[in-house]
Image (tube, grey):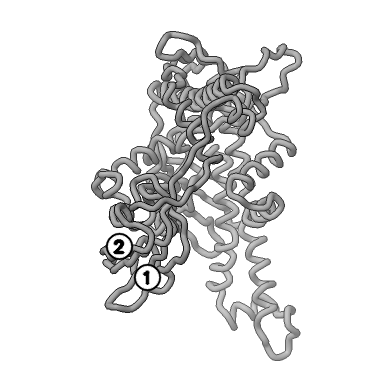
C-alpha cells in the first residue's frame, strides 16, 4: 500500500491511498464466504457455493463492493498511522479509481489534530488578586451561624421584611387552580426571594388572618412564563430572635470557649477558601499567559460540536430550574447575540487549552496508572452524584475511558506549567502553590526524593476546559 498526505489547512488533511489488488484478495475471499452463507443455490450446500457460481447469481460487482467496504477502513487507519495523523472526526472517503484485477485508489479528507510549536513554558510569570478576607465577610458568616441558632416568636403585627410567615398559597388561571401550584402551612422568610415574583411585596403588611391576591408568572410546569392569579393567606407572623454574640454563644455553636476564638476560626476558614480560589485563578492565569505565546489552529468541527454540547447543557439546566432562555438572558442583562459571542469565545479558549495541554503531556511523556484512573473515576462520580461503580461501568461500556485518561494527562500538564511558573499577587508577593493542600492550608516543602512522581498536590482544574 502507498499513501500520500496533502495538507488542506492546519487542521484538515487529505490522504490519497493506493492499494494493490493483491491486498484486496483476503477481503474478497471473505466476501465470497459471507455471501455463500447467505444464498441458496440448488445443488450446493449453504456456505459451499463456488465463487464462479456466486458471480453468476449475485454478480462480481456486488462481491467487489463488499470487499472494498471491508478493506477501505483498515487501509485508512494504516495510512493515518503511516503519516502520523491524529483524526478528530469521521473522514469523508471517496473511491476514486478501481477496476477488477487492478489497484484500488481512494481519498480521505479528515479533520486532524493541529501541529503546535510549543514555546518554552518554564518560568512563566502571571499575576492574580490578593487574598483578602474582609471584616464584612467574617460578619456575614458569623451572622449566618447566629441565624442557625435563632428562635421564632409569634408577633401580633403585620409582616415586615425579614420576618417569617406561615402561609397558604394557591395559583389559579381563569378561576381554576393550577395543578402543582398550591402549598399549605409553608414557612417563608419575607424578602428572601426566589419563589414567585411579587410574593414578597404582597406579604409585607399582612397580619395573621389576612390574605391578598396578586398576578405573577410561574417558574415551572406547563404554564411556565404565563400570567396566573396567586392568592396568599397568612396564618402566622413570626419574628426571628437571634442569640447574643458572646462567649456563651461560641460554646453553644462551636467547639470554642470564647467568641474571639470562634471569629478567628471563621476568618481562618474564609482565608483557606480564598487561597484555594486564588490557586484556581493562578492556574488559569498561567495557562492564559502560555496561550498568548502560541497560536493554536482550531478545527471548526470540534468548535461547533463543543458549542452545541454546551448550548444544550445550558438549556437543560435552565429547563431543570424552570427558567426559559429569554428569562435567563433578561436576568443576565445579555442579548442573544452577546450570549452566543461570549459562549463561542469561551469554547474557543477551552478547545485551544485542551490542544495545548495535550501537546505538553506528550512532550513530557506523562503516563498514568490504574490507581490514578480509579481515583479520578471516583472523583468524577462524586461530582455528578453517581455511584462510583455504576459510573465506572458506564465509562467502560460506552468507551469513555480514553476521555478520562486525557483529562488526567491534561491535569498533569497544567500542574507542570504551574509548578515552574512564578505567580505573584497584586501586592507583589509570590503565591505559594506547590505546597498548597486541598483544604487550603500550606504544607511543609516535600523533599525531592520523597515526592511522588508526577503526582500533583490536588487535581488541577482548567476553567472551561
Neighbourhood count class around disc 1 (C-alpha, 10 Å): few under 14, some 14–19, many 20 upward: few
Residue at position x 42%, y 68% from top?
182
User: For mark 2, what is the residue?
Assistant: 217
Label 1 element class: loop
Residue lying at the far top of the rendered structure: 428
Is 442 situated above or below 13? above
How many numbered circles does the render carry? 2
Residue at position x 46%, y 32% from top?
353
Which comes sooner in the sequence, label 2 or label 1? 2
Residue at position x 46%, y 66% from top?
184
Residue sitting nearer the eye, 4 or 394: 394
Give the CA separation, mark 2 to mark 1. Answer: 12 Å
Label 2 element class: strand
Name the spot of residue 167 as percent of width and height, x first: 42, 61
User: For mark 1, what is the residue?
Assistant: 222
Residue lying at the far front of the rendered structure: 156
Name the spot of residue 108 as percent of width and height, x first: 46, 51
Q: Is residue 176 left or right of residue 464?
A: left
Name the spot of residue 345 as percent of width and height, x first: 34, 38
Is 114 situated above or below 263? below
Residue at position x 49%, y 36% from top?
144
Residue sitting nearer the eye, 245 or 378: 245
Neighbourhood count class around disc 2 (C-alpha, 10 Å): few under 14, some 14–19, many 20 upward: some
Residue 227: quadrant of the picture: bottom left
User: Would you say residue 88 is visible in this rendering?
Assistant: yes
Q: Which mark is residue 416?
A: none
Residue sitting nearer the eye, 250 or 208: 208
Amino acid at each position: 500500500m502507498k499513501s500520500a498526505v496533502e495538507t488542506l489547512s492546519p487542521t484538515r488533511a487529505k490522504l490519497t491511498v493506493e492499494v494493490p489488488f493483491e491486498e484486496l484478495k483476503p477481503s474478497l475471499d471473505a466476501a465470497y464466504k459471507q455471501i455463500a452463507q447467505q444464498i441458496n443455490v440448488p445443488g450446493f450446500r449453504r456456505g459451499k457455493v463456488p465463487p464462479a457460481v456466486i458471480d453468476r447469481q449475485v454478480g462480481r460487482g456486488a462481491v467487489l463492493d463488499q470487499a472494498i467496504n471491508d478493506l477501505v477502513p483498515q487501509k485508512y487507519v494504516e495510512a493515518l498511522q503511516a503519516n502520523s495523523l491524529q483524526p478528530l472526526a469521521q473522514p469523508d472517503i471517496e473511491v476514486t479509481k478501481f477496476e477488477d484485477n487492478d489497484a484500488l485508489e481512494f481519498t480521505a479528507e479528515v479533520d486532524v489534530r493541529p501541529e503546535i510549536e510549543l514555546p518554552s513554558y518554564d518560568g512563566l510569570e502571571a499575576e492574580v488578586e490578593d487574598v483578602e478576607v474582609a471584616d464584612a465577610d467574617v460578619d456575614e458568616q458569623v451572622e449566618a451561624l447566629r441565624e442557625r441558632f435563632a428562635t421564632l416568636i409569634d408577633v401580633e403585627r403585620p409582616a415586615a421584611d425579614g420576618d417569617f410567615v406561615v402561609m397558604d398559597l394557591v395559583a389559579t388561571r381563569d378561576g381554576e387552580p393550577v395543578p402543582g401550584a398550591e402549598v399549605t402551612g409553608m414557612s417563608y422568610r419575607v424578602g428572601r426571594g426566589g419563589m414567585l415574583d411579587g410574593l414578597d411585596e404582597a406579604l409585607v403588611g399582612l397580619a395573621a388572618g389576612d390574605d391578598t391576591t396578586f398576578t405573577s408568572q410561574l417558574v415551572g410546569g406547563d404554564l411556565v412564563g404565563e400570567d396566573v392569579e396567586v392568592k396568599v393567606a397568612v396564618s402566622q407572623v413570626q419574628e426571628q430572635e437571634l442569640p447574643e454574640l458572646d462567649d456563651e454563644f461560641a460554646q453553644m455553636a462551636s467547639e470554642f470557649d470564647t467568641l474571639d476564638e470562634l471569629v478567628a476560626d471563621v476568618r481562618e476558614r474564609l482565608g483557606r477558601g480564598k487561597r484555594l480560589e486564588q490557586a484556581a485563578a493562578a492556574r488559569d492565569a498561567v495557562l492564559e499567559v502560555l496561550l498568548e505565546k502560541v497560536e493554536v489552529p482550531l478545527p471548526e468541527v470540534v468548535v461547533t460540536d463543543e458549542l452545541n454540547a454546551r448550548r444544550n447543557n445550558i438549556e437543560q439546566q435552565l429547563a431543570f430550574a424552570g427558567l426559559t432562555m429569554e428569562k435567563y438572558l433578561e436576568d443576565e442583562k445579555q442579548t442573544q447575540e452577546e450570549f452566543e459571542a461570549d459562549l463561542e469565545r469561551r469554547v474557543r479558549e477551552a478547545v485551544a487549552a485542551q490542544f495545548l495541554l495535550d501537546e505538553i503531556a506528550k512532550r513530557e511523556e506523562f503516563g498514568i496508572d490504574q490507581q490514578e484512573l480509579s481515583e479520578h473515576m471516583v472523583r468524577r462520580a462524586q461530582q455528578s452524584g453517581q455511584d462510583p461503580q455504576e459510573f465506572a461501568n458506564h465509562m467502560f461500556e460506552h468507551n469513555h475511558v480514553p476521555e478520562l485518561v486525557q483529562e488526567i494527562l491534561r491535569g498533569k500538564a497544567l500542574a507542570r506549567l504551574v509548578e515552574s511558573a512564578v505567580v505573584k499577587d497584586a501586592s507583589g508577593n509570590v503565591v505559594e502553590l506547590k505546597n498548597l493542600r486541598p483544604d487550603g492550608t500550606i504544607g511543609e516543602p516535600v523533599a525531592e526524593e520523597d515526592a511522588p512522581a508526577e503526582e500533583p498536590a490536588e487535581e488541577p482544574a482548567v476553567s472551561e476546559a
